[in-house]
Structure formats: structure tokens, C-alpha cells
Image (spheres, helix red, strand yellow):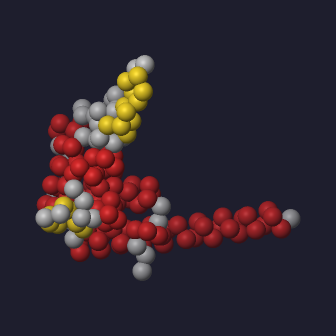
Amino acid sequence: MTTVYDVPPDKLTKSVGAELKKNKVITMPEWSKDVKKGMSKELPPEDKDWWWVRCASVLRQIYLHGPVGVSRLRTYYGSSARRGVKKARFRAASGKIIREVLSQLEQAEYVIKTKKGRKISPKGQSFLDDAAHELKNTQEPIKEVLEEAAGVTNGE
């Protein structure tokens, strides 16, 4: 059985984000159109689907490292902030975004709240595993074609 560990994370989050966009429980809040992702950012995200990609990424992080709290997720999504002439310093990501994402994932029943933080629910785990399996099946033929093409060019 294919799991989240067997596929590239960037492709998984994009495909899971597209699936989450179809879910009516997970919606982009009105305030999120003009918000920055963290103190270290200067502008709001350019990608129109960034909310669902972030939801997919948070779901993947909970799958891999759960139970996880808001503080650890803020640290994971944070980055260094430029401060002019002074040295750059690490700044955590926006906690409001992460709290809202976790709330929506709980309402969709992909995440369960425990005493130690959020952990993946069986429904969320099967959702991610199914998405990974589907992604791996679509990549296998491409990988075989590339290997054959490499073998033809190296053999001549």
C-alpha cells in the first residue's frame, strides 16, 4: 500500500489541495485574501489556491509528526525576516491562519484534537493514503518512459 512517505511532498500537497477545494467544509475565509502568511513576508500570497495548499500541507505535517500543536506548526512554516542593515532573524508564521486551518480540518473530520495537540484521524489518514496511491499510479508510467528514453540515448 502506498503511503505519504512514497510520493514527493510538493506534488502530494497540490493534488490534496485540489481535492480539499471540492470539500464544502474547507473554505477560504474572507480575511485571507489580504493577509500575509507571516511576519517575515512582505506581500500576500500570489497563488489563488494557497489556502487549500496550506490545508493539505498542515494535514501532511500532522500525518508525519502528530500529535502537533499550533506552536510547532508556526515554527515549521516560519522563516527568517529581513531587518534592513541588521542580521535577519527567524520569525514564526501566522498563528491565525494555522488555527483556522486546524479548525476547518477538525470540522471535516480529518484531524482529531487530543490533550497533546492535533493528530490525524482514520478518515484523514485514508484520505492522504488514497491521494498518495493515486499520485503514485499516475507517476509510474512517466517514470518508466523516462528510464527507457535514458536507456536508448545511453546505448547509442
User: Residue lying furthest top in this view?
Assistant: 85
- At x 24% / y 68%, what residue is drawn? 120
Tell me what residue is drawn at x 21 percent, y 51 percent: 70
Residue in the picture at 39% in, 36% down: 80
Please provide percent x and percent y for residue 111: 20, 64
Q: Nearer the viewer, residue 43 or 89?
A: 89
**Residue 59: x %, y % from top left:** 29, 60
Residue at figure coordinates x 25%, y 59% from the top left: 68
Relative to 94, is 149 above or below?
below
Asked if 2 appears above or below 102 in the picture, the reply is below
- On screen, 156 above or below 70? below
User: Where in the figure is residue 40, as x and y percent of width and height?
Assistant: 34, 33
Q: Could you say where residue 43 lies in the image, as x and y percent from the top left?
A: 33, 29
| Residue 119 appears in view | yes
- Quarter residue 83 falls in: top left
- Kindly give the residue lying farthest to the bottom in the view shown: 1
Q: Residue furthest right?
A: 156
From the viewer's perspective, is residue 35 above or below residue 57?
A: above
Q: As rendered, which of 5 and 79 lies closer to the eye? A: 79
Task: Describe residue 13's horizontal placement relative to residue 95 as left or right.
Answer: right
Asked if residue 141 lies left or right of residue 101, the reply is: right
- Of the 4 image quadrants, the one containing the C terminus is bottom right
Give the quadrant of the N terminus. Answer: bottom left
**Position of residue 139 in the picture relative to residue 4 (left or right):** right
User: Quadrant location of residue 131?
Assistant: bottom left
Q: Which one is in front, 104 or 65?
A: 65
In the picture as drawn, the residue positioned furthest to the front comes out as: 87
